[in-house]
Image (cartoon, grey):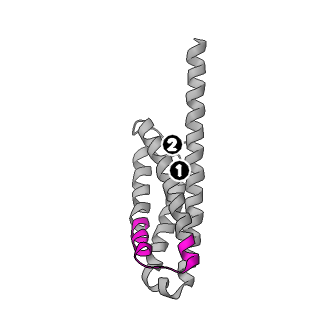
């Protein structure tokens, strides 16, 4: 009996740690996408070509963080992450095609790191639990 209780405690601690990782990653992504959007709006060249996409990305990151905070079910988190992925990949292609303002380029690199952190935390969480479970 003691082994089962200890195993359950270890499992719960691992779940809490991964939930904390997802929350931290989603916080960072929201913060960094908002900063990117602010920088894109200041850059006259990017303002024309990337402003709406950067705004969509920031909005999607905000919505995703709220879904994580609400401990939304897997399907909701997947849908929210899909809404991040589309503008993220569009911006990645945009900035990969031409040299942007160095500040914007650095901001996008920060967004990329946070995006990958969220993707990693979410993939781990989603492969560990059934679709009806909530992320904590």
Verify CB contact (< 8 Å) between mark 1 and mark 2.
yes
> Is 135 drawn above or below residue 8 in the view shown?
below
From the top left corner, tell me how far across and down residue 29 is, in percent.
Answer: 55, 60
From the top left corner, tell me how far across and down residue 20 is, in percent.
Answer: 60, 45
Which label was assigned to residue 22? none
Q: Nearer the viewer, residue 102 or 75?
A: 102
Q: Circle 1 — which element? A: helix
Q: Nearer the viewer, residue 113 or 6?
A: 113
Q: Residue, x 44% and y 66% (percent of image)?
A: 88
Compute the Cα span from label 1 to label 2.
7 Å
> Is 95 drawn above or below residue 32 in the view shown?
below
From the top left corner, tell me how far across and down residue 99 is, in percent.
Answer: 47, 79
Q: Residue, x 40% and y 36% (percent of image)?
A: 130
Q: Residue, x 55% and y 41% (percent of image)?
A: 18
Disc 2 packing (10 Å; few <14; some 14–19; many ≥20): many
Region of the chain picked out in magenta, as a range: 88-106
* The magenta stretch spans residue 87: no
Disc 1 packing (10 Å; few <14; some 14–19; many ≥20): many
Q: Residue, x 60% and y 20% (percent of image)?
A: 6
Q: Nearer the viewer, residue 15 or 74?
A: 15
Which label was assigned to residue 135? 2
Main secondary structure type of the part rendered in magenta = helix
Which label was assigned to residue 68? 1
């Amino acid at each position: 009996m003691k082994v089962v209780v200890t195993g359950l405690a270890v499992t719960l601690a691992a779940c809490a740690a991964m939930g904390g990782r997802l929350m931290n990653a989603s916080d960072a992504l929201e913060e960094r996408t908002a900063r990117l959007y602010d920088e894109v709006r200041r850059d006259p060249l990017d303002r024309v070509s990337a402003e709406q996409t950067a705004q969509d990305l920031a909005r999607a990151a905000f919505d995703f963080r709220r879904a994580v905070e609400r401990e939304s079910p897997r399907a909701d988190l997947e849908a929210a992450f899909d809404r991040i992925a589309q503008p993220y990949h569009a911006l990645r292609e945009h900035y990969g095609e031409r040299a942007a303002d160095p500040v914007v380029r650095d901001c996008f690199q920060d967004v990329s790191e946070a995006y990958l952190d969220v993707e990693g935390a979410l993939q781990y969480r989603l492969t560990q639990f059934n679709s009806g479970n909530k992320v904590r």
